[in-house]
Amino acid sequence: MTSLEGLAPAFRRCVGELGMWSASSLFVATARAAGGEAGVAALEEALGSEFPVLEQVALGFAAPDVTEEVAASCVGLRRLVVVGIESDCLAPLLARLPRTVAVALILDPTFPVDLDRLRAGWGHQVELTDLAAFQRFSGTKSALLTTVYGTDGFRAAVARVWLRCHGDDVRSQFGRLIGWNVLGATMDRFPRWLVETDIDDFTDLIGAP
Amino acid sequence: MSSLFLLGLFVTTIVAQAVFPARRLEIVLSGAGLAIASSALAGNDASRILAEIPWDVLVIMASLGVVSRVLGESGVFTRLAVRGTLLTRAEPRWILVGGALLMFFISGLVNNITALLLVLPIVIAIFELVGTTQRHLRWTIGVLLVACNLGGASTPIGDFPAILLLGAGAMAFKDYLVLAFPAALVALVLLLVIVQLVVRPTRGMDASPLRREITVAAVEALHRRVRLDPWLLIPGLVVLAAMLAAWIVFPASVVPPHMIAWIGGVVVLAATAHRTKTALIKGIDVEATLFLFALFALVGTVSASGFFADLGDRLADLPLPPSVKLVILVGTTGLATGLFSAGPSMAAMLEVGQPLASSVAPAAVYIGLALGVCAGSSLLLTAATSGPLTESLIARASLADDQGRPVSFTFKSFLPVGVLSFSVILGVGLVTVGLIAGT
């Protein structure tokens, strides 16, 4: 009735194109709607051990919606580089940003992505860039933004690609480095697929408990 | 001697391009160049051979390529495929039926490659989400490919063989549509019934309701932001509809089909230039156009030697009833297409079939040829361009079944689908030809 064996590769693709938190929220919400708590339990059983963010979402961990605060922190920006996609965050943020703000996106290469589909969906609002080119968006009125998957006030779980973007040189090239916490408190499990970083990486950490 | 050399060159080139499909353009271009050069050395006028290339067919194909591209970029095929997923609720059995019908109707209007490139990624995402097995993958993807071939044969603009008939003035647009569309649709329905009731590709699959709901939600989410672009969709649809109406209303002797295609292509480019500057470059499939150009030149040189006409006369003179000669022609066309692909087979067999068209209803010969080519295109994975493309797209997706075993779509795995499809399409084609010839 609720066999979800072999779903992990499909989940990884959804993570690549929607984001870890957005894909987890989608899968958990659908499982709950279709199969109630038994459905969520089956999903957790199938994917929870491999994807701790999904497990946290299934357990009800979530930060309050801080889209307005994130949008407020972007006031005055001319360029915004989003590091790692989270479609449920990016879409409402884009709706609140002035059209004059140029938005670029660096994908996390950890997960598979259909670039054509991604371009068809986001291409009219977001420019896809990469680690070799994102610094052309730098400037005092520029910001780097990434999603944070839980923090304890000292460390924060982020996508692996953040560590490859962030460094002393980059810190001086961008006006702001914004962290957007979507998961509330830190995970009590090893953050597989993610890495931990110091919260001092960020000039603004929004949604921290 | 010269005609024997040309024939040898023709056969060698056609076999080589079938054996090395990745190098088919270079092979056919080289073959055509050698054929023209040897023909010129034998005292023939090379410019006459080039002048006899059916440029009108190339114009129709190029214009339809542009319209296909504009419609593809509008997002309409993606939205249709997502809508289809929602309608079938990701039930594997209905994905096969719905996908086949969708590909059939799309391929009737735009070229197979455009349709496949836009719909296959969605099918692959569904397979990843809902799960698949080797059996399910083989039959679902195989039937989708065959549905593309049938859709292409169902209208005069769906694929090269029918366009060749339209461009050559062999059949009027409406006449072809009235005869070929029902036959192709019957063949598809028959194939789907056999596959669903006898083969049962979903046997052994366990797609739970929960998993199907997750699949539907995920496919919707992955494509949520792919929106219809009305500035591409409306001009594309309006121009395509106008071209179809013009082809139906105006006789080819009054307004040649390639003129309608030419005007349509220019209008759609002008109307969409502000949205997609690269439509012209992307829309015209340079490789396909060059391939057909070289093919026509190659066939033209052999044709100038009188070989095809002679073969056609021999077939027409066989002491057999016309119906048996038709069966030989259609069956040979199907097998030749399976082995050597659609382009060379149709170009050559059209000439062979011409003498027979004087003793039986010409429509029976031409529809028989088109359906024979369609059957042959569906026999082997290498017979149509869409086959190797699909193979590589599936390989790139690295699909696995629920136990983690890799599943693949290869020449060998397609073979059972191909043999069944070839038999069904050829059978329906022969019955159709018999009915046309009998009336």
Image (cartoon, coloured by chain):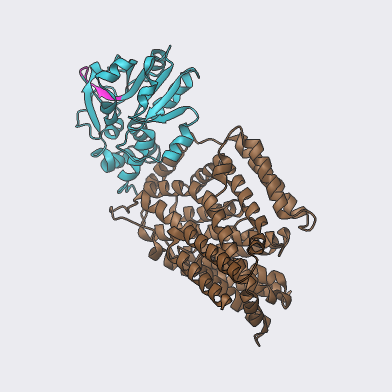
Chain colours: A cyan, B brown
**Position of B338 compared to A158: left or right?**
right
Q: Relative to the observer, which residue lies in front, A82 or B271?
A: B271
Above/below status of B46 relative to B323: above
Name the spot of residue B226 as percent of width and height, x first: 50, 36
Above/below status of B426 relative to B162: below
Q: Relative to the observer, which residue lies in front, B277 or B330?
A: B277
Q: Is A149 colored magenta in this rendering?
A: yes
Q: Relative to the observer, which residue lies in front, A48 or B361?
A: B361
Q: Relative to the observer, which residue lies in front, B292 or B345?
A: B292
- Splitting the image into 4 quarters, where does residue A198 fall? top left
- All told, the count of numbered labels is 0
The residue segment tinted magenta is A148-154
Q: Residue at x 72, y 78 (%)?
A: B359
Report whether residue A112 is seen: yes
Name the spot of residue A48 as percent of width and height, x first: 26, 38
**Position of B378 compared to A145: left or right?**
right
Above/below status of A152 relative to B257: above
**Position of B16 compared to A168: left or right?**
right
